[in-house]
């Protein structure tokens, strides 16, 4: 298995996944789409963590542990984020972040 | 070099990346959500290939089973405004975003492709057992804190979303 | 138990009464006066206890203490450290001060008692609106006098001395709102504020003497290092001071083996100190150059005149000379140039005769007594100055009693004379008793004494104008007459006082006055003796004039016809004081005839105060009691009788009318001179007052033209400089500041455009930054 696929391949896949997620977070108008981009970025990070664990220190479970933590935190983030969007939607009738610009000058 | 495994890796990777591209390219948010499920599943496949079955299961259960469904629900709750197909889903800075994302990919790839020296060890025979011992051993405190965070997030979400 | 230990309580009781009345019981009139009287009774009881205990301990104790160089009963506490020494406070009791506290509390108590009636406490409608304050002032005054006489040093003494001065001021001006008037062109016109003017005059005139007193204290403290009597009076200190000189100019100093002589003058310290201290006594005891305030002080309420300006405070100056006698004596002994005791005697002698002559021509009942007081104080000063120390102190004691009696009697007469007006007062007058400042309900104009108005700005001495009798003046003896039937108690007590004052045997004044005369005769100071005897004759004359015009004949005005005897609160003190004035002289009957009662008790007692100083070698009883000299006594009695006879001859043979001129006024020039007090007031007005006003005007002009000119010039320069500064400020400093502001504002206007409020924009910036940093990292790797 380790001999079949080099570590760099996983990393490049994860990098691509991260870049796609970043594009989603930066370019999409819908707030939930942004959230999806962020989820993709988090998955990319998880892939990295697991790949490093497997290739560099399989005896130490730290990689998987951190990946698990990130999954848990991502779930929490998704729950909070979606609750926020629903609250914004109720008060402003929109979920487009371009129109949510209270912080503008 | 096992061609079979290599080809499976390529297939799974393609599924993952195609799903991800679908997420960011879809014309409706609902479609994006569906593409997201595909991408999550691909990542789960990667975990399997990386000999982390527990994480693969968790990925399926949490992401595909919970987060994606949650997202789809949210999309449907708010679809009245943004759901119309034909309206551009991208904002005014999408070009710059694409450039930045591409540059980010190049930078990350450049740092990724180097001469890694993989360890010759193999993972523990019962990796799940080891993982459980790690959670309740050296990582007990973070583990507990994460559980508290989850609880707080739960309560916070309820409060925020409450009418 | 030694009561002398508690002597500090003697002044403390009245002081507490003052505090309590002012702070707490001001509203309640009767309570206030009761507190004041109670405090005086306590002080009096304590004084008498001290007195009798001191007598009981006997002369041996006093003598032993004197030889040990201290007062027999003395207590000291540290008060304020000054340099290397410490100013102390305490009590200093020797026979002199014990006699004084007994006298002050006794006379004071009588006067407090009397004041209740005088201020009409029995008649609520006419009670003085500031009745409580009056008793507060009286108490404070009593505290001042008692504290003064038991002072152990001059520092404490001047503190209480000034307390007395303050009280004198406050009490003379007690009816400060009263407008006095003058009779001009047949009309009674408002003239001025006699009371407040008199108060100011008294205060400022005594201030002149006080400056000397204070300088004397400073000089004594400087050369002796202390003002404690027990230390100053030691023979050692006095002997050292005799050879001390106060120098002005450079001291001698050695320079390269050469002695550079001093440049300047050196004056004998004791002489200077004595004369300066005597200046204080001159001011306080109204001696010749500074006597002018005392007659005007009669504007105050009569009990005040009795207490302060006859019996006690004016005696403070005499007491000062008596107390500091060792210093005076040492100064005379050292005999460097001027002999201070001779100065004292000369001033006293002159004042005695001078004031007695003025007394002849006065028409105001209180003014006559005022000049009599000045004259008698001159007697005491002359006595002490001529060496009759014991006799002078004795005269101070007897005088306090009979002069207090006379003043209170005159107050009673005035009170009786006012009866007519009092009963005719409209009730509205008493409606607003608190309006003290504008109009005085109790003492309206009719109590005014126009002959007392002294206004520095008036063209002529107003008080001197009595070309026409003022028919409303209750103090003018020409408006009285025949009062002995209307006011019998007042008459008889007044008669006792007059007899005592004029030196008729048995009565107090005779014994003390005769002793002074005998001493001067025995010591061959013949001139002094003759002048004082003459003065005694003049005294008898003017007192006979007063007595006859007030009490004998027929009433000359309606006021006199309507006069009523005063209430018992006023007559009882008169009776007590009359008895005292009659009998107090018996304390000092000379041995030759007096052994059957007290012997020459007073001499033996008071002579225990060493007059030459304290210490082992002090000569006690340096002045043996002067023996009765029948020639002197006979002559003085004869003179007094001649005075009485002349008085009767001039005034007693027929009935006068109120508007009639005085028979003696036929000698117009002499009469006017005397009535105007030798024009001393006019003299002072035209020299000191006009002079100081002119000087002030000159200085004011100097101030306006030159000082103000300089100040204004400086101001103008400052304004010019400021204008330049303002231009710089406006265009350069402000420009810079505003420039900073404008730049900041414009920068902010541009930079705020970054804040789009578009979250993804921020995220893009974040990742661009990450890319930049990564690029740098990769490039540098």
Image (cartoon, rainbow, N blue to C red):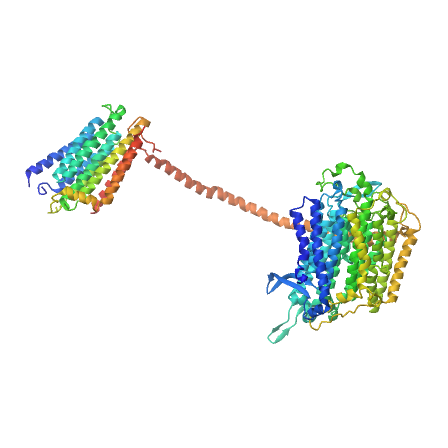
- Residue in the foreground of this view, choosing between C283 and C746: C283
Would you place residue C237 above or below residue C763 in this image? below
> Residue A63: which quarter of the image?
top left
Q: Nearer the viewer, residue A79 or C133?
A: C133
In the displayed structure, does residue A90 sit left or right of residue C85? left
Residue A43 is situated, as x and y percent measured from the top left of the image, at 19, 37
Task: Report the number of numbered marks.
Answer: 0
Q: Residue furthest right?
A: C653
Q: Residue furthest bottom?
A: C257
Which quadrant holds residue C425?
Answer: top right
Image location of residue C162, percent across then percent down: 69, 55
Frontmost residue, C173 versus C151: C151
Q: Viewed as shown, does residue C57 lie left or right of C774?
A: right
* Residue C769 on image: x %, y %: 26, 40
- Residue C310's x, y, as percent? 77, 55
The quarter in which the N terminus of chain C is drawn is bottom right
């Amino acid at each position: 298995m380790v001999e079949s696929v080099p570590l760099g391949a996983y990393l490049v896949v994860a990098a691509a996944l991260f870049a796609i997620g970043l594009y989603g977070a930066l370019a999409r108008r819908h707030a939930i789409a942004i959230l999806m981009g962020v989820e993709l970025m988090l998955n990319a990070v998880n892939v990295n963590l697991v790949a490093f664990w497997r290739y560099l220190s399989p005896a130490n479970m730290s990689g998987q542990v951190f990946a698990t933590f990130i999954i848990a935190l991502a779930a929490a983030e998704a729950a909070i984020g979606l609750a926020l969007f629903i609250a914004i939607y109720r008060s402003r009738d929109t979920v487009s972040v371009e129109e949510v610009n209270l912080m503008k000058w | 070099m096992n061609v079979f495994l290599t080809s499976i890796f390529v297939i799974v990777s393609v599924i993952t990346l195609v799903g991800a591209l679908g997420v960011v390219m879809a014309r409706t948010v609902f479609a994006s959500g569906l593409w997201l499920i595909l991408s999550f599943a691909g990542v789960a496949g990667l975990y399997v290939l990386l000999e982390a079955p527990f994480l693969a299961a968790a990925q399926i259960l949490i992401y595909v089973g919970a987060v994606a469904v949650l997202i789809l629900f949210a999309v449907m709750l708010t679809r009245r405004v943004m759901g119309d197909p034909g309206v551009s889903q991208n904002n005014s800075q999408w070009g710059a975003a694409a450039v930045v994302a591409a540059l980010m990919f190049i930078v990350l790839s450049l740092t990724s492709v180097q001469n890694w020296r993989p360890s010759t060890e193999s993972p523990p025979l019962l990796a799940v057992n080891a993982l459980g011992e790690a959670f309740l051993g050296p990582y007990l405190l973070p583990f507990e804190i994460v559980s508290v965070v989850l609880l707080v997030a739960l309560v916070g979400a309820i409060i925020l979303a409450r009418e | 138990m030694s009561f002398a230990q508690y002597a500090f309580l003697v002044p403390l009781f009245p002081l507490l009464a003052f505090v309590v009345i002012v702070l707490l019981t001001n509203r309640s009139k009767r309570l206030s006066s009761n507190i004041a009287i109670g405090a005086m009774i306590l002080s009096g009881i304590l004084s008498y206890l001290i007195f009798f205990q001191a007598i009981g301990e006997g002369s041996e104790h006093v003598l032993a203490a004197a030889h040990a160089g201290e007062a027999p009963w003395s207590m000291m506490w540290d008060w304020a450290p000054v340099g290397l020494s410490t100013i102390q406070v305490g009590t200093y009791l020797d026979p002199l001060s014990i006699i004084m506290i007994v006298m002050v509390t006794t006379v004071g108590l009588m006067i407090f008692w009397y004041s209740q009636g005088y201020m009409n406490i029995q008649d609520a409608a006419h009670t003085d609106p500031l009745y409580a304050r009056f008793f507060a002032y009286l108490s404070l005054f009593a505290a001042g006098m008692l504290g003064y006489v038991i002072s152990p040093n001059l520092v404490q003494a001047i503190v209480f001395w000034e307390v007395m001065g303050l009280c004198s001021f406050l009490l003379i001006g007690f009816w400060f709102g009263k407008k006095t008037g003058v009779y001009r062109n047949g009309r009674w016109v408002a003239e001025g504020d006699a009371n407040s003017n008199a108060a100011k005059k008294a205060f400022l005139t005594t201030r002149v003497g006080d400056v000397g007193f204070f300088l004397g204290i400073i000089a004594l403290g400087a050369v002796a290092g202390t003002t404690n009597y027990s230390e100053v009076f030691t023979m050692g200190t006095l002997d050292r001071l005799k050879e001390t000189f106060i120098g002005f100019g450079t001291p001698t100093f050695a320079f390269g083996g050469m002695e550079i002589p001093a440049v300047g003058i050196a004056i004998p310290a004791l002489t200077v100190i004595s004369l300066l201290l005597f200046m204080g006594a001159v001011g306080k005891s109204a001696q010749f150059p500074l006597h002018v305030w005392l007659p005007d002080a009669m504007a105050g309420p009569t009990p005040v005149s009795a207490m302060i300006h006859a019996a006690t405070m004016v005696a403070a100056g005499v007491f000062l000379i008596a107390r500091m006698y060792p210093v005076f004596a040492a100064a005379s002994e050292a005999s460097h140039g001027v002999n201070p005791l001779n100065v004292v005697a000369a001033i006293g002698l002159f004042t005695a005769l001078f004031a007695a002559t003025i007394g002849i021509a006065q028409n105001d009942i209180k003014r006559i007594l005022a000049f009599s007081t000045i004259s008698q104080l001159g007697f005491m000063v002359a006595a002490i100055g001529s060496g009759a120390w014991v006799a002078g102190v004795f005269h101070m004691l007897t005088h306090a009693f009979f002069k207090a009696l006379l003043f209170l009697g005159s107050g009673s007469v005035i009170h009786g004379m006012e009866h007519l007006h009092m009963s005719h007062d409209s009730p509205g007058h008493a409606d607003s008793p608190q309006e003290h400042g504008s109009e005085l309900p109790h003492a309206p104009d009719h109590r005014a004494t126009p002959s007392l108005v002294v206004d520095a700005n008036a063209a002529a001495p107003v008080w001197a104008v009595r070309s026409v009798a003022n028919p409303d003046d209750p103090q003018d003896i020409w408006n009285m007459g025949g009062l002995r039937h209307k006011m019998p108690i007042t008459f008889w007590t007044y008669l006792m006082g007059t007899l005592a004052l004029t030196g008729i045997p048995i009565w107090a004044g005779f014994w003390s006055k005769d002793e002074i005369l005998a001493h001067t005769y025995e010591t061959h100071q013949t001139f002094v003796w003759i002048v004082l005897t003459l003065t005694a004759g003049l005294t008898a004359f003017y007192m006979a004039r007063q007595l006859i015009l007030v009490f004998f004949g027929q009433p000359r005005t309606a006021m006199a016809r309507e006069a009523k005897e005063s209430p018992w609160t006023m007559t009882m003190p008169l009776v007590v004081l009359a008895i005292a004035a009659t009998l107090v002289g018996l304390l000092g009957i000379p041995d030759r005839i007096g052994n059957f009662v007290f012997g020459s008790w007073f001499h033996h007692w008071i002579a225990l105060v060493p007059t030459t100083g304290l210490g082992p070698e002090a000569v006690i009883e340096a002045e043996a009691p002067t023996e009765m000299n029948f020639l002197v006594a006979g002559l003085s009695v004869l003179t007094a009788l001649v005075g009485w006879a002349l008085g009767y001859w001039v005034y007693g043979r027929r009935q006068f009318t109120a508007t009639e001129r005085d028979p003696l006024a036929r000698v117009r020039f002499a009469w006017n001179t005397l009535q105007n007090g030798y024009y001393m007031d006019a003299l002072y007005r035209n020299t000191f007052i006009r002079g100081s006003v002119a000087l002030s005007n000159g200085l004011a002009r100097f101030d306006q033209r030159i000082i103000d000119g300089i100040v204004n010039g400086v101001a103008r320069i400052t304004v010019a400089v400021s204008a330049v500064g303002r231009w710089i400020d406006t265009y350069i400093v402000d420009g810079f500041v505003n420039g900073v502001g404008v730049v900041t504002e414009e920068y902010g206007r541009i930079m705020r455009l970054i804040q789009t409020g578009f979250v993804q924009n921020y995220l893009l910036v974040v990742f661009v930054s990450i890319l930049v940093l990564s690029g740098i990292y990769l490039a540098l790797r």
